[in-house]
Amino acid sequence: MNSQPPVRLLQGHALEVLREVPADSVHCVITSPPYLNLRSYKTEPVAWPDGWVGHLGMEPRVEEYIAHLVAIFREVRRVLRPDGVCFVNLSDSYAGSGSPGGDFRDGKGGDEYLRPYNRQGQALKPLDLCGVPERFALAMQADGWWWRDRLAWSKTSAMPERVAGWR
Protein backbone atom coordinates (compact mmCIF):
# COMPACT_ATOMS: atom_id res chain seq x y z
CA MET A 1 0.00 0.00 0.00
CA ASN A 2 1.38 3.42 -0.99
CA SER A 3 1.48 5.83 1.95
CA GLN A 4 2.68 8.81 -0.11
CA PRO A 5 0.45 11.90 0.13
CA PRO A 6 -1.17 13.03 -3.12
CA VAL A 7 0.76 15.47 -5.29
CA ARG A 8 -1.09 18.51 -6.56
CA LEU A 9 0.36 20.60 -9.40
CA LEU A 10 -0.85 24.19 -9.59
CA GLN A 11 -0.09 26.40 -12.56
CA GLY A 12 -0.77 30.10 -13.07
CA HIS A 13 0.05 33.51 -11.62
CA ALA A 14 1.65 32.94 -8.21
CA LEU A 15 -0.66 35.34 -6.36
CA GLU A 16 -3.82 33.75 -7.80
CA VAL A 17 -2.66 30.15 -7.39
CA LEU A 18 -1.45 30.64 -3.82
CA ARG A 19 -4.88 32.03 -2.87
CA GLU A 20 -6.33 28.59 -3.74
CA VAL A 21 -4.07 26.88 -1.19
CA PRO A 22 -5.42 26.51 2.36
CA ALA A 23 -3.66 28.45 5.12
CA ASP A 24 -1.10 26.60 7.24
CA SER A 25 -1.08 23.60 4.89
CA VAL A 26 2.39 23.56 3.30
CA HIS A 27 5.47 22.09 4.98
CA CYS A 28 8.15 23.35 2.60
CA VAL A 29 8.47 25.83 -0.28
CA ILE A 30 11.46 25.68 -2.60
CA THR A 31 11.34 28.20 -5.41
CA SER A 32 13.44 30.09 -7.92
CA PRO A 33 11.56 33.20 -9.05
CA PRO A 34 12.47 34.76 -12.39
CA TYR A 35 15.62 36.83 -12.01
CA LEU A 36 15.40 40.57 -12.64
CA ASN A 37 15.27 41.28 -16.37
CA LEU A 38 17.22 38.25 -17.49
CA ARG A 39 14.54 36.25 -19.24
CA SER A 40 11.03 36.53 -20.60
CA TYR A 41 9.00 33.34 -20.34
CA LYS A 42 6.69 34.49 -23.15
CA THR A 43 3.50 34.17 -21.11
CA GLU A 44 0.58 36.56 -21.04
CA PRO A 45 1.26 39.76 -19.06
CA VAL A 46 -0.36 39.87 -15.62
CA ALA A 47 -2.06 42.81 -13.89
CA TRP A 48 -0.44 43.33 -10.47
CA PRO A 49 -2.28 44.87 -7.49
CA ASP A 50 -0.14 48.04 -7.81
CA GLY A 51 -1.47 48.59 -11.34
CA TRP A 52 1.63 47.49 -13.26
CA VAL A 53 0.99 45.03 -16.08
CA GLY A 54 3.77 42.67 -17.04
CA HIS A 55 5.79 39.62 -16.07
CA LEU A 56 7.51 39.01 -12.74
CA GLY A 57 11.17 39.83 -13.28
CA MET A 58 10.55 42.29 -16.10
CA GLU A 59 9.65 45.26 -13.90
CA PRO A 60 11.15 48.58 -14.99
CA ARG A 61 12.77 49.19 -11.57
CA VAL A 62 14.38 46.86 -9.04
CA GLU A 63 12.18 48.32 -6.27
CA GLU A 64 9.02 47.23 -8.10
CA TYR A 65 10.45 43.74 -8.62
CA ILE A 66 11.23 43.43 -4.90
CA ALA A 67 7.75 44.71 -3.97
CA HIS A 68 6.14 42.08 -6.23
CA LEU A 69 8.26 39.31 -4.69
CA VAL A 70 7.29 40.44 -1.18
CA ALA A 71 3.59 40.39 -2.19
CA ILE A 72 3.95 36.81 -3.44
CA PHE A 73 5.81 35.70 -0.33
CA ARG A 74 3.08 37.14 1.90
CA GLU A 75 0.84 34.50 0.35
CA VAL A 76 3.59 31.89 0.75
CA ARG A 77 3.77 32.77 4.46
CA ARG A 78 -0.01 32.36 4.73
CA VAL A 79 0.07 28.83 3.30
CA LEU A 80 3.16 27.70 5.25
CA ARG A 81 2.55 25.77 8.43
CA PRO A 82 3.98 27.34 11.59
CA ASP A 83 6.82 24.79 11.41
CA GLY A 84 7.23 25.24 7.63
CA VAL A 85 10.35 26.40 5.82
CA CYS A 86 10.99 28.36 2.64
CA PHE A 87 14.06 28.30 0.39
CA VAL A 88 14.49 30.92 -2.35
CA ASN A 89 17.06 30.67 -5.15
CA LEU A 90 17.59 34.26 -6.29
CA SER A 91 20.53 35.65 -8.20
CA ASP A 92 21.63 39.14 -9.13
CA SER A 93 22.01 41.30 -12.24
CA TYR A 94 24.38 44.03 -13.32
CA ALA A 95 22.87 47.39 -14.16
CA GLY A 96 22.93 48.30 -17.82
CA SER A 97 24.54 45.06 -18.90
CA GLY A 98 21.75 44.07 -21.25
CA SER A 99 21.91 44.39 -24.98
CA PRO A 100 19.32 44.14 -27.74
CA GLY A 101 18.28 40.57 -28.39
CA GLY A 102 18.47 37.65 -25.99
CA ASP A 103 15.69 36.04 -24.03
CA PHE A 104 14.62 39.24 -22.28
CA ARG A 105 13.82 41.11 -25.50
CA ASP A 106 10.14 41.76 -26.03
CA GLY A 107 10.51 42.37 -29.78
CA LYS A 108 9.09 45.89 -29.85
CA GLY A 109 12.34 47.68 -30.58
CA GLY A 110 13.65 50.72 -28.76
CA ASP A 111 14.91 50.68 -25.18
CA GLU A 112 12.10 48.60 -23.66
CA TYR A 113 14.28 45.50 -23.82
CA LEU A 114 17.26 47.07 -22.06
CA ARG A 115 17.72 46.36 -18.38
CA PRO A 116 15.95 48.87 -16.14
CA TYR A 117 19.00 50.77 -14.96
CA ASN A 118 20.14 51.32 -18.54
CA ARG A 119 17.52 54.05 -18.76
CA GLN A 120 18.16 57.65 -17.80
CA GLY A 121 17.19 58.83 -14.34
CA GLN A 122 17.88 55.57 -12.49
CA ALA A 123 20.03 55.35 -9.38
CA LEU A 124 22.51 52.68 -10.45
CA LYS A 125 25.31 53.28 -12.90
CA PRO A 126 26.04 50.88 -15.75
CA LEU A 127 27.89 47.78 -14.46
CA ASP A 128 26.72 48.33 -10.84
CA LEU A 129 25.63 45.14 -9.13
CA CYS A 130 21.91 45.61 -8.43
CA GLY A 131 22.00 43.83 -5.05
CA VAL A 132 18.77 41.94 -5.69
CA PRO A 133 19.34 39.10 -3.17
CA GLU A 134 20.28 41.53 -0.40
CA ARG A 135 17.40 43.91 -1.20
CA PHE A 136 15.02 40.94 -1.23
CA ALA A 137 16.29 39.56 2.10
CA LEU A 138 16.04 42.95 3.81
CA ALA A 139 12.55 43.59 2.40
CA MET A 140 11.44 40.15 3.58
CA GLN A 141 12.82 40.84 7.09
CA ALA A 142 10.92 44.13 7.15
CA ASP A 143 7.80 42.16 6.18
CA GLY A 144 8.19 39.83 9.16
CA TRP A 145 10.24 36.92 7.78
CA TRP A 146 13.30 35.49 9.47
CA TRP A 147 16.47 35.48 7.36
CA ARG A 148 18.14 32.32 8.61
CA ASP A 149 21.03 31.70 6.24
CA ARG A 150 22.61 32.40 2.89
CA LEU A 151 23.74 29.43 0.84
CA ALA A 152 26.27 30.20 -1.88
CA TRP A 153 25.87 28.56 -5.27
CA SER A 154 29.19 28.97 -7.02
CA LYS A 155 28.57 28.84 -10.75
CA THR A 156 31.56 28.20 -12.97
CA SER A 157 30.00 29.61 -16.15
CA ALA A 158 29.07 33.20 -16.95
CA MET A 159 25.46 32.31 -17.74
CA PRO A 160 22.84 33.63 -17.55
CA GLU A 161 24.65 36.91 -18.01
CA ARG A 162 28.10 38.12 -18.91
CA VAL A 163 29.26 41.64 -18.07
CA ALA A 164 31.47 43.42 -20.56
CA GLY A 165 33.37 46.60 -19.83
CA TRP A 166 35.40 45.66 -16.78
CA ARG A 167 38.70 47.50 -16.72
Image (cartoon, rainbow, N blue to C red):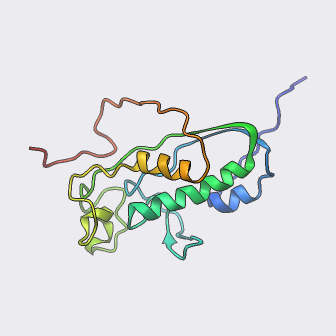
Q: Residue at x 79, y 51 (%)?
A: 23
Determine whether, in the image, residue 43 is placed left or right of residue 116: right
Q: Is residue 98 left or right of residue 79?
A: left
Which residue is depicted at the point 24% across and 45% down? 162
Quadrant location of the C terminus?
A: top left
Horizontally, residue 37 falls left or right of residue 7, namely left
Residue at left 39%, top 60%? 62
Between 104 and 147, the one lying in front of the other is 147
Quarter of the image where one finds residue 158:
top left
Between 152 and 147, the one nearer to me in the picture = 147
Query: Which of the 4 image quadrants contains residue 7?
Result: top right
- Given residues 26 and 44, the one toward you in this image is 26
* Residue 14 in picture, x, y percent from top left: 63, 57
133 lies above or below 36: above
Q: Is residue 113 above or below residue 80?
A: below
Q: Position of residue 153 (x, y in %)?
A: 41, 31
Q: Quadrant of the N terminus?
A: top right
Residue 9 spot, x, y in % from top left = 71, 47
Residue lying farthest to the bottom in this orientation: 51
Question: Which residue appears at 73% of the width and 59% of the height?
Answer: 19
Q: Position of residue 136 (x, y in %)?
A: 47, 50
Outermost right residue: 1
**Nearer-the-camera pick, 48 or 7:** 48
Could you tell me if residue 149 is visible in this image?
yes
